[in-house]
Amino acid sequence: MDITDAQFEEQVLKSEIPVLVDFWALWCGPCKIVSPIIEELAKEYEGKIKVVKVNVDDNQQYSGKYNVMSIPSIFIFKKGQPVKSMVGAQSKDNFKKAIDEVLAS
């Protein structure tokens, strides 16, 4: 689900379940590689973790707040706080490991 800065607080910071946030942009090659992996994870972890995407070109408030300097930047938020972050294209296994760690904590 694509969200804007205006939706970030409600969708991410106030979420009852952990949220994986994919900070991305249309022109970003590695973002295009990661996107189908993120979509697969959204289906696999449905009900356990929420997955949202934030286009950094259109929404700079939260990408600036969390010092997103390179994209894709993947953050996992739990109880309104970023608890994990990964920068650049990663394997599905790396993403799953991070998600599983957050869910177990």
Image (spheres, rainbow, N blue to C red):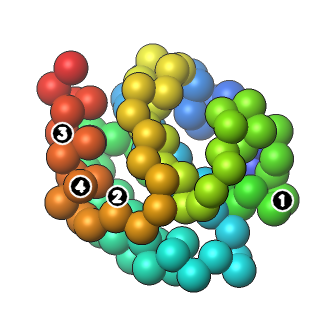
Q: CA distance from mark 3 to mark 4?
A: 10 Å
Label 1: which residue? 58
Q: CA distance from mark 1 to mark 2?
A: 23 Å
- Element under disc 3: helix
Label 2: which residue? 42
Q: Nearer the viewer, mark 1 or mark 2?
A: 1
Residue 43 visible to the viewer: no
Counting from the top left corner in percent of width and height, residue 58 is at: 83, 59
Report the amino acid beneath label 1: Asp
| Apparent side of residue 7 relative to residue 87 in the rendered image (left or right) | right
Give the mark nearest the N terminus, 4 or 1.
1
Q: Are circles 3 and 4 on residues that touch, CB within 8 Å? A: no
Give the mark nearest the N terminus, 1 or 2.
2
- Element under disc 2: helix
Q: Are circles 2 and 4 on residues that touch, CB within 8 Å? A: no
Q: Which mark is residue 100?
A: 3
Q: Nearer the viewer, mark 2 or mark 4?
A: 4
Give the mark nearest the N terminus, 3 or 4.
4
Label 2: few (<14), some or many (≥20) within 10 Å? Answer: some
- Element under disc 1: loop
Picture quadrant of residue 103: top left
Report the amino acid beneath label 2: Ala
Label 4: which residue? 94
